[in-house]
Image (cartoon, helix red, strand yellow):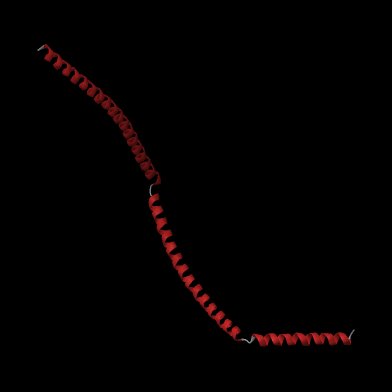
């Protein structure tokens, strides 16, 4: 009977040690979680303060600028209209330039065709004959007036 009591005592001690270890682990986890919670709270407060500061800054800028936002919108609208008109003018100018280039291209093609029809061999022969006659005329002049 005493032996059974000792065995139960040992079981209780073993369970108690196990529960103590579990309790220690849970306390440690709780401490870690509390630390994390504190860091998160600090971060949250910091972010809330930044948001508040930004709201104040926005309000101050809006109060300082007054109707500046409206004038900026008007200027943007005006610039957009100018941009559209410039784009249209550029398209018209490009169209005129394209027409001019096509006309010039047509004239150059006609000139090229005309030049291709010229008898180049005959032209070169005529030039050679003219060179020979010129040299002969120069030689005769030099003989008459030494």
Give coordinates of residue 70: x percent, y percent: 38, 52
Quick check: 78 above or below 104?
above
Position of residue 123 measured from the top left corner of the image (x, y, whole percent): 67, 86
The residue lying furthest to the top in this view is 2
User: Which residue is pictured at 49% across the width and 73% down the height?
Assistant: 98
Q: Locate residue 80, reporting x and y percent.
A: 41, 60
Closer to the camera, 5 or 131?
A: 5
Label count reads 0
Answer with left or right where residue 44 lies relative to residue 111: left
| Camera-nearest residue between 41 and 4 | 4
Q: Is residue 81 above or below residue 49?
A: below
- Quick one: which residue is furthest to the left in this view? 1
Q: Quadrant for the N terminus, please.
A: top left
Q: Nearer the viewer, residue 138 or 12?
A: 12
Residue at the spot 71% in from the left edge and 85% down from the top edge: 127
Q: Quadrant of the C terminus?
A: bottom right
Q: Residue 138, located in which quarter of the rendered image? A: bottom right
Q: Residue at x 30, y 30 (%)?
A: 36
Q: Quadrant of residue 10?
A: top left
Query: What is the quadrant of residue 42 in the picture?
Result: top left
Query: Residue 119: x and y, percent?
Result: 63, 87
Q: Residue furthest right?
A: 146
Q: Nearer the viewer, residue 90 or 29?
A: 29
Q: Is residue 99 left or right of residue 52?
A: right
**Where is 81 relative to 124, above or below?**
above
Q: Residue at x 45, y 65 (%)?
A: 87
In this image, 69 relative to 27: left or right? Answer: right
In the image, taking residue 128 as reference, residue 90 lies left or right, namely: left
């Amino acid at each position: 009977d005493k032996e059974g009591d000792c065995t139960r005592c040992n079981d209780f001690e073993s369970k108690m040690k196990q529960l103590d270890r579990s309790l220690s682990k849970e306390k440690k986890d709780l401490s870690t979680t509390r630390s994390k919670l504190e860091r998160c709270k600090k971060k949250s407060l910091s972010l809330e303060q930044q948001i508040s500061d930004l709201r104040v800054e926005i309000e101050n800028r809006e109060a300082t600028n007054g109707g500046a936002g409206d004038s900026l919108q008007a200027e943007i609208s005006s610039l957009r209209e100018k941009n559209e008109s410039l784009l249209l003018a550029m398209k018209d100018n490009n169209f005129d330039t394209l027409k001019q280039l096509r006309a010039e291209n047509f004239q150059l093609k006609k000139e090229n065709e005309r030049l291709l029809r010229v008898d180049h061999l005959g032209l070169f022969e005529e030039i050679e004959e003219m060179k020979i006659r010129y040299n002969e005329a120069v030689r005769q002049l030099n003989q008459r007036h030494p």
